[in-house]
Image: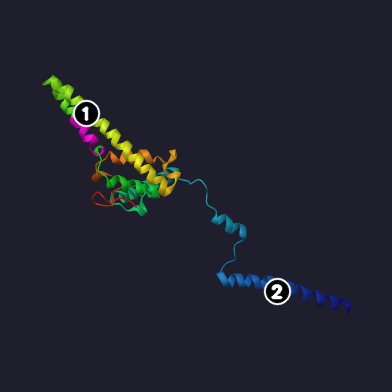
């Protein structure tokens, strides 16, 4: 009787212990149709290599993305879309510099065509009219001096405005605001990039 009693108890326990696992297995097979993968297997399946297998294709795709972004940024500058310009062109003092330079009339705007004109006149004068060479050189140097003075006066006025509105950071050495303003002033207004916000001069920034 004792043996049968313990035997019956053991058999009941074994039945009870095995039933949860059987139920889990049944749930797994019923729920997904296959056993649930282990955690390590799932993590290994989600892992991606840090170095791509095809490096050449990866570099080519990265170059294509950079080229597309640069083309989009240049198109934004050409059309005057400030929101999609490069980050440096969206700085508030850069926008102020562009508006200030575009609002004024300066002799520096015609520097490049003037230099080409004086170069042609000088070459012709050397061959045909030597006396004209000296006069053309004097006019050319006078124009260059006028351009330098014009840019100097423009930057002094613009610098005071930038400091009053944006503080010293707008004219710090790393900002390159002076060179940015001078380079823009040297270009024809209609050829400037980013495009001027106003079609005519006289719209001074506040």
* Magenta part, dominant SS: helix
Q: How many marks?
A: 2
The dot on residue 140 is 1
As drawn, 2 above or below 198: below
Question: Where does label 2 land, which residue?
Answer: 19
In-image side of 195 versus 136 (left or right): right
Name the residue rendered at 39%, 46% in the picture: 162
Name the side, left or right, on which 138 lies relative to 8.
Answer: left
Numbered circle sitting on residue 92: none
Q: Position of residue 89 (x, y in %)?
A: 37, 47
Between 81 and 93, the one lying in front of the other is: 93
112 within the magenta span:
yes
Element assignment for label 2: helix
Q: Quadrant of residue 120?
A: top left
Q: Is residue 49 left or right of residue 141?
A: right
Any part of residue 120 in sight: yes
Find out whether residue 188 is within the magenta segment: no
- Say which residue appears at 59% left-offset and 62% top-offset: 37
Residue at horizontal 65 percent and vertical 71 percent from the top: 24
Q: Which residues are magenta?
A: 108-117
Q: Marks 2 and 1: which is nearer the front? A: 1
């Amino acid at each position: 009787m004792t043996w049968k009693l313990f035997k019956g108890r053991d058999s009941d326990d074994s039945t009870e212990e095995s039933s949860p696992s059987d139920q889990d297995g049944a749930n797994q097979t019923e729920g997904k149709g296959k056993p649930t993968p282990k955690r390590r297997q799932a993590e290994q399946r989600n892992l991606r290599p840090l170095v791509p297998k095809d490096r050449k294709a990866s570099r080519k795709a990265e170059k294509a993305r950079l080229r597309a972004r640069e083309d989009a940024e240049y198109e934004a500058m050409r059309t005057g879309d400030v929101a999609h310009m490069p980050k440096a062109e969206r700085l508030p003092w850069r926008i102020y510099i562009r508006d200030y330079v575009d609002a004024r009339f300066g002799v520096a705007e015609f520097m490049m065509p003037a230099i080409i004109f004086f170069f042609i006149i000088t070459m012709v004068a050397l061959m045909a009219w030597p006396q004209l060479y000296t006069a053309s050189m004097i006019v050319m140097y006078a124009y260059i001096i006028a351009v330098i003075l014009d840019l100097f006066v423009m930057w002094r006025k613009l610098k005071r405005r930038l400091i009053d509105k944006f503080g010293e950071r707008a004219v710090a050495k790393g900002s390159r605001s002076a060179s940015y303003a001078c380079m823009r002033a040297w270009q024809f207004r209609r050829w400037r990039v980013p495009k001027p916000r106003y079609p005519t001069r006289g719209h001074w920034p506040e």
